[in-house]
Image (spheres, coloured by chain):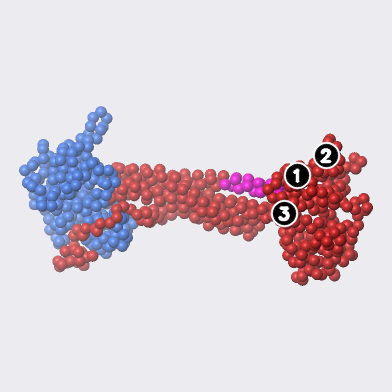
Amino acid sequence: MNELSPAKAAPAPATEALPQPLPPLPPARSGLSLGEAAFAALSALAANKLRAALTSLGIFIGVAAVIVTVAVGAGARQQVLSQIQSLGANLLLVWGANVRLGGVSLGAGQRPNMSWDDAQAIPREIPSVEVAAGTIRQQMQVVNGNQNWSTWVNGTDPAWFVAHEWQVAEGRFFTEEEAAGGRKVVLIGQTVAENLFGDENPVGREVRVRATPFEVIGVLGRKGQNPMGQDQDDVVVMPYWTARRSVMGASRAFARAVGSISVKVHEGESMADVEEQLRQFFRQRHRVAANEPDTVNIRNLSEIAATRDASARTLSLLLAAVAAVSLLVGGIGVMNIMLVSVTERTREIGLRLAVGARRRDILRQFLLEAVLLALLGGAAGVLVGIGLAHGMSAWGGWPVLIQWDAVGLAVAVSGLTGLFFGYWPARRAAKLDPIVALRHE
Amino acid sequence: MDALPETLAPSPPAGGWLIETRDLSRHYPSGEGVVKALDGVDTTIAPGEFVAAMGPSGSGKSTFLNLIGCLDQPTRGTYRLAGEDVSRLPPDRLAELRGRKIGFVFQSFHLLPRSDALTNVAMPLMYRGVPRRIRRDRAVMALERVGLGQRIHHTPSQLSGGQQQRVAIARALATGPELLLADEPTGALDSRTGLEIMALFQALNRAGVSILCVTHDADVAAFAGRTLRFRDGKLFEDTRYPPVDAAAMLGVPFA
């Protein structure tokens, strides 16, 4: 560029150029570009690193709290959802109520008062019911060779698999014919399979239940724990009539009795309505007088899960409130430090205005500084929040699920916090009178 | 005390006046009355002139500088800068004019303390939207012009007062302005350093840069070729004279 200068031609005493005006600048797009403003804002922040770090601490804590909160909330919700799914959706469980005999309470379900025929009648009488499966269950010893395992043995209807949404991992379910014929076939849960057969395939093998040999025709898919913490895979299932005749050996009085009935309601039907219809069904069938209590208990298992979901939600709301307060306080911190910065840099602002910065350039520079300050806090909050969430999952055993839309939202909100709380200080900077600002001490 | 018309150049130069003011006034409301910081100034400055503005404090010389520098706007009268009437413009247009046509040199240098000389000199170009590479080249060129080509990465605290003022002059030159405005440029310097700065101004002026220098010091005004004296907001004397050569006084050849 020196060739543009006439001084080059004259003999110069030093290597440096002589005092000459510079050639005119080529015409350029006027004004401060966003990238330049961002760079200037970053340099200003870098000049005061400790102050910037302390200022963005509030935003940092707010964003980290949001990330962890949402991750824990979403993790809990996902766990509850998968538990509801494992129970079977739209499922009502009917148990015999607490029965009194001669003034003595015998406890709920101790004296079977429902029959196989009740279960068969329910889908006919109540159209909203998809299937109903009467079940008896008893804890028994199951033996394979020298391995034995005490587990819950269920005698039930093939409809039970539908109601509880079981899948088979290996083999098959039993058929209606096998059920009606009382064939000695069983399906075993994953826990039972592991304890009796280890790595071997149990399908086609024989197990003994109370000394009676049974053919294993299937292994049930894994469900894990139910919301009460019980292992749903620790189970053996056989046809109702097989259980009645071969292993449970009930007295004649209870020959057709069932301990519980699993009722699956059609999708879209009101669970509460069906619950009431079931109550009335049993009152009629058991001829209960109007002033007497119900003879059955009906439980909506997904409701229990939903209650847990609601408590997780409350916790999330509480933490979200903490996060919001933290963001607010962080935003006020940003505003405070930006006001200090504007005052400190009044002379510099005056100079920038004098050399050609427009008011909107100054506004943009200071606004960007506030936004970057908040965003840096937000970004650090995201990193630490995700780290904390993973830590809670790894060491605390909490179910966490990082919600990336929430992460994006948290960063956006922190940026907006900077924009909102940075606007007033930036406007103050932009409105300075260059003459006054230049003389500022 | 009117401006003396016979001392003005009789007709505009070929390229037109650099500065032309008619009845230039700046009044401030104050209590019940009005402070006439500047009142009815008619003057013209041709391109390539080196003019000093003198007067005691409160005389109006600083107000005149602020108006000429487009930092302020007159309450009455007109001001034409390089032929363009700039007396009634919105603030952003004025800012653009300052960036394009005027270079400021202040008594207290006004450098960004944490930035090196290069960054300081390149800063005004940022607001012109000049790309980074060109900014750097221009800044290096401007620093070479003021004799600081070897110190482009020094921060103000690593430079002497005279060197800091040179950086400020380089910053004013970087945009290629029509007019250099200096407000007491030697006020914060010892006399020898001040002489060096004035020699630099004279060299720049000889190379074609127009300079308006506000000072209260008659010795400084002697290096210009013309002095405008202000008193009570009015221009009461406009004299031309052969300038004293600052470089000769230093015994150092500058140009």
Please state the extent of the stretch shown in magenta in the rendering. Answer: A300-320
Q: Residue furthest top?
A: B32
Which chain is painted in blue? B
Q: Is residue B160 left or right of residue B209?
A: right
Question: Percent position (x, y) of residue A421?
Answer: 44, 45
- Quadrant including the N terminus of chain A: bottom left
Q: Residue, x 83% and y 47% (percent of image)?
A: A96
Same chain, labels 1 and 2: yes
- Residue under numbered circle 3: A88
Residue type at numbered disc 3: Gly
**Which chain is assigned red?**
A
Question: Is A381 left, or right, of A238 in this rendering?
Answer: left
Where does label 1 land, which residue? A275
Q: Residue A315 lies in magenta, yes or no?
A: yes
Q: Secondary structure at mark 1?
A: helix
How far is the residue under mark 1 from the one under mark 2?
Answer: 16 Å
Residue position marked by numbered label 2 in the rendering: A293
On the same chain, marks 1 and 3? The answer is yes
Badge 2: chain ID: A
